[in-house]
Each structure stands twice: as C-alpha cells, then as structure tokens.
Amino acid sequence: MNQKLQKRLLATGAIMVAIGLFSYLAVGGIGKNLVYFWDVKELLTKGQDAIGVTVRLGGVVKNGSLNWDAKTISLKFIIATSPEAEDGYEVPVHATAAPPQMFKDGIGAIVEGSYDGKVFQADRVIVKHSNEYHPPKDENKPMPNFVKELIEQENSADISDKAVK
C-alpha cells in the first residue's frame, strides 16, 4: 500500500468516526431532554403512562380554583379544557413559585412538570396570551402636555424651594 492511499484511508476513517460520534451525541441524548406538550384530555387518557413523565400541560385555569399563598409561596389551581370544565377533564396543579403577573381565573396556561396520578407538580407556570397590541382607550390616554406640565411644576417647585432658603 502506498503512502497516498494510507493517508486517504486514515482521513476517511477519521471522518467516519467523527460523524458516528456526532450522531451518537445528537441522537443519543435527545430522548432525555424531550418535553412533550399535552392537553388535559391527553394527560388523563394516557392513564398510568402519564405518571412521572415530564410534560408541558396546556389548558385553561378553571374559574374559582385559583389559590395563591404568598407566605408559603404555594400556588394551587385546576387546569381544565375550558374555564367551566363542563366536559369533566380537569387536573389539579401545585406549583411552588410565584404566579406570572397576568395569571388569573379563565386564562390560558401552560405548566411544565410531572403528574403523580392525582396532582400535577409544576416546575414552571406560563401564561398564554395574545401577541396583539391594543392602544389605550381615549379615557386612558395621557394628556398631550401632561409630561411637559409635570416638568414645569417640578421646576417651579425647585425655584420656590431655593427662594425660601
């Protein structure tokens, strides 16, 4: 075997080993890091297969179920398929984190964690909301010269304070 052929075989072998190693790392570890998205109905119909699996559970916070205790940092609520949960698909959720600012009854929510067969233990609570911007209504808009008037009032107050001293 000549030297040129040996170098080619060595380079091809090194490339094959690198591709194999990269494939193993990319595909081999992905199963442990996958987080599936299920709705409430899917979670409940999976039965025993849903217990202990880390998932993102999507639904709506059932009206009247929200219970936040700031002293113990305990958030409990029921996530369901609708705010009134007429179809009976609902799961109690417990999280030990402060709720997001927009969190309230009837809002869409996604919780990430695992189900123990009775309660969904959430590590994260995410609020689903619209990405549409709505400008404030006329009665809520600031006055056109509001900021200018505040600055002028502040300046006149500073001048009168200096005059008194």
Image (spheres, rainbow, N blue to C red):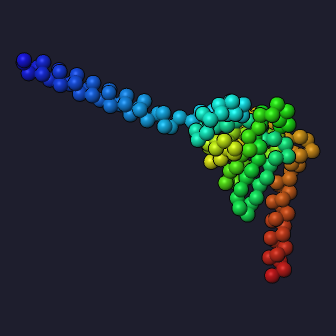
Image location of residue 80, percent across then percent down: 77, 37
Q: Residue furthest bottom?
A: 165
Work out whether residue 88 or residue 58 is closer to the camera in this orientation and state it.
88
* Above or below, comparing residue 116 to residue 158 in the picture: above
Q: Residue at x 22, y 24 (%)?
A: 13
Give left or right: position of 92 versus 18. Answer: right
Q: Position of residue 89 (x, y in %)?
A: 77, 34
Residue 154's spot in the image, x, y percent? 82, 65
Q: Nearer the viewer, residue 54 or 141?
A: 54
Q: Is 90 on the left or on the right of 53, as rendered?
A: right
Q: Is residue 107 above or below residue 75?
A: above
- Viewer-closest of 52 and 106: 52
Residue 9 quadrant: top left
Q: Residue at x 76, y 38 (%)?
A: 90
Residue 124 seen in the figure: no
Question: Residue at point 50% right, 37% down?
Answer: 33
Split into 4 quadrants, where in the image is the N terminus? top left
Q: Quadrant of residue 161?
A: bottom right
